[in-house]
C-alpha cells in the first residue's frame, strides 16, 4: 500500500456546524427543554434568531429560506417566534442566572422584515428572552435591496454592532450569471447607507468561482469592497458548478478538477490581495482588518455550548444535545416546514436533533479550532478532555501532516494549519467527521 495519500478535493463541504443537520433525526422521546437545560451553564449563552425569508432566491444558495411572504406570513412567523421565545425562557428557569453574551439575526434575510417588524424581533430578544442587545455584540445579515435607511436605523438604535451584507460580486454580469441580478449602483448605495448608521463592523460577503469570473474581475470586486474599508470580508467559494464554460469539458472528473483548480487560484489571489492590504486571515473564508478591533461572535471558535436558536431553521445546543426543527432543501418542503412552525403552539420540547457524546465533542472542538487560522492550543484541549488530539485523532492528524496541511513551524503547544491546509479547509473538515455522523448524513434523504 502506498504511504502517499491522494490529495482530496479541496471543496467537500463548508463545515460551519458539526454535526450537520442532515445527521439530525426525530427524537422519539421529545425531551422537555426544561430537563435538557436544567444542569447547563446559562450565564454566557448565544442567541440566534432565524428569519427564513428573502426577496429572491440566489442561484448558489442552499440556506433554509423561501422567496417572499404572502398573506402576512412574516407577522405570523413573529407570533410563533414570540411563543417559542416564551417557552424557551420558561424552560431556562431562574434557578441559575440566565445571561446572553452574544446575539445574531440571520436567515434568509432578516431585513426582509419591515422596520416595525425588526423592532418587534428586537423586543422578542429583549423582553421575552432577556438579552440585553445594547450591551452585547449583535450581528445582523442584510442584502442590498433590503438594507433600507429605516430598517438600518432600527437595527443601529437597538444595538447592532455588526452588519453583514451579501454582495457576492460587484460585476453586474457575474451577479446575473450565478448569483442574482443587481445593479452596482444599488449595491454601492446600500453600502453607503450601512456606513451612515455608524454601526462599528461592516462585513461584505463575496463569492469566487462564478462563471466567467477571471482574476481581473475578481480583483475588481475585491477592490470595490475594499474601497469601503470593511472591518471584515468573507470570501466564499461557489459550490454550484457553472454549466457553461466547464460544460465544454466532456469528462466530468476533468471538469471538476479544472473547476477546483480555478477556485483555488481565485482563493489564493483573493487571500494574497487582502493580506497585502492590511487584513488578517481568520479562517479560510474570513478576513479581518488588522485595525478593526476585537472580534465579533461570527466564525469564532466558540467551544462552549449553550446556543439558543429561535425560528424554524435555527439550531440550539446544550452540551449533550443539538436540536432544531425539521430540515429541508427543497422549496416546497421549506414552505411547508415554515407553515408547520407558524402553526405550532407548544414549543416546550425538542423534536429533531442529535445527541453529542464525548467523542463527538472532541471532534467538534478539534474541527472548530483547527479551521481557524490561529490554530488550537493543545493545553485548552487537554484541560477540557484530559487527553491530546494526537492520542484521540492520531491517524487523521498524521494524514494531514503527510498532505502538508499542518504548520510544522507552529509554536510549541499550538496545532495549526499550514496555508495549504487552510486552503483545503472544506476537504479537511469532512475528514474529521465521525463514522456515525458520516453514515447518518449519507442515509439522509434530501427533501
Ligand atoms: S439573500 Fe442570502 S439567504 Fe437569501 S437566497 Fe440569497 S444567499 Fe440565500
Image (cartoon, rainbow, N blue to C red):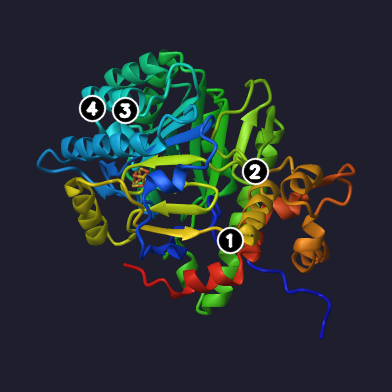
Badge 2, how many Cα within 10 Å: few under 14, some, many 20+?
many
Q: CA distance from mark 1 to mark 4?
A: 38 Å
Element assignment for label 3: helix
Whether residue 171 appears in this view of the structure is no
Residue at x-position 19% and y-position 45%: 345
Q: Nearer the viewer, mark 3 or mark 4?
A: 3
Element assignment for label 2: loop
Q: CA distance from mark 2 to mark 4?
A: 34 Å
Q: Nearer the viewer, mark 1 or mark 4?
A: 4
Element assignment for label 1: loop
Q: Nearer the viewer, mark 1 or mark 2?
A: 2
Residue 7 lies, with reference to residue 381, above or below; the image says below
* Residue at mark 1: 11
Q: Nearer the viewer, mark 2 or mark 4?
A: 4
Residue 128 bears which disc, if any?
3
Disc on the earlier residue, 1 or 2: 1
How many tags in the picture? 4
* Residue at mark 2: 283
Marks 3 and 1: CB-CB under 8 Å?
no
Give whichever of 264, 347 is nearer the camera.
347
Q: Position of residue 133 (x, y in %)?
A: 42, 21
Disc on the earlier residue, 3 or 1: 1
Residue most extreme to the bottom: 1
* Residue at mark 4: 117
Amino acid at each position: 500500500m502506498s504511504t502517499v495519500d491522494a490529495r482530496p478535493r479541496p471543496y467537500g463541504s463548508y463545515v460551519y456546524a458539526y454535526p450537520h443537520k442532515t445527521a439530525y433525526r426525530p427524537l422519539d422521546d421529545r425531551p422537555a427543554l426544561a430537563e435538557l437545560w436544567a444542569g447547563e451553564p446559562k450565564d454566557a449563552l448565544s442567541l440566534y434568531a432565524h428569519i427564513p425569508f428573502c426577496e429572491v432566491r440566489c442561484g448558489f444558495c442552499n440556506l433554509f429560506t423561501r422567496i417572499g411572504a404572502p398573506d402576512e406570513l412574516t407577522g405570523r412567523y413573529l407570533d410563533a417566534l414570540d411563543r417559542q421565545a416564551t417557552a424557551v425562557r420558561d424552560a431556562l428557569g431562574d434557578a441559575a442566572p440566565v445571561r446572553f453574551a452574544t446575539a445574531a439575526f440571520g436567515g434568509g434575510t432578516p431585513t426582509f422584515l419591515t422596520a416595525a417588524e425588526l423592532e418587534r424581533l428586537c423586543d422578542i430578544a429583549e423582553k421575552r428572552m432577556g438579552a440585553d442587545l445594547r450591551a452585547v455584540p449583535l450581528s445582523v445579515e442584510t442584502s442590498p435591496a433590503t438594507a433600507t435607511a429605516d430598517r438600518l436605523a432600527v437595527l443601529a438604535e437597538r444595538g447592532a454592532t455588526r452588519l453583514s451584507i451579501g454582495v457576492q460580486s460587484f460585476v453586474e454580469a457575474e451577479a446575473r450569471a450565478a448569483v442574482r441580478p443587481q445593479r452596482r449602483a444599488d449595491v454601492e448605495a446600500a453600502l453607503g447607507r450601512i456606513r451612515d448608521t455608524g454601526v462599528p463592523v461592516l462585513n461584505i460577503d463575496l463569492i469566487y468561482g462564478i462563471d466567467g469570473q477571471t482574476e481581473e474581475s475578481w480583483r475588481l470586486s475585491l477592490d470595490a469592497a475594499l474601497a469601503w474599508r470593511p472591518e471584515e470580508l468573507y470570501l466564499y467559494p461557489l459550490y454550484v458548478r457553472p454549466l457553461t464554460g466547464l460544460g465544454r469539458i466532456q469528462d466530468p472528473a476533468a471538469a471538476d478538477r479544472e473547476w477546483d483548480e480555478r477556485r483555488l487560484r481565485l482563493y489564493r489571489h483573493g487571500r494574497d490581495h487582502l493580506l497585502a492590504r492590511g487584513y488578517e486571515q481568520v479562517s479560510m473564508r474570513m478576513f479581518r482588518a488588522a485595525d478593526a478591533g476585537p472580534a465579533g461572535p461570527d466564525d469564532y471558535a466558540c467551544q462552549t455550548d449553550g446556543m439558543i436558536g429561535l425560528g424554524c431553521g435555527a439550531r440550539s445546543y446544550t452540551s449533550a444535545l443539538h436540536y432544531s426543527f425539521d430540515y429541508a432543501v427543497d422549496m416546497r418542503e421549506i414552505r411547508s416546514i415554515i407553515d408547520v412552525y407558524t402553526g405550532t403552539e407548544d414549543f416546550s420540547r425538542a423534536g429533531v436533533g442529535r445527541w453529542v457524546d464525548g467523542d463527538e465533542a472532541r471532534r467538534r472542538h478539534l474541527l472548530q479550532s483547527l479551521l481557524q487560522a490561529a490554530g488550537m492550543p493543545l493545553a485548552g484541549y487537554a484541560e477540557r478532555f484530559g487527553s491530546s488530539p494526537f492520542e484521540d485523532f492520531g491517524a487523521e492528524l498524521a494524514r494531514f501532516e503527510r498532505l502538508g496541511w499542518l504548520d510544522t513551524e507552529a509554536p510549541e503547544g499550538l496545532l495549526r494549519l499550514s496555508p495549504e491546509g487552510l486552503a483545503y479547509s472544506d476537504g479537511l473538515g469532512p475528514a474529521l467527521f465521525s463514522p456515525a455522523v458520516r453514515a447518518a448524513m449519507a442515509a439522509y434523504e434530501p427533501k
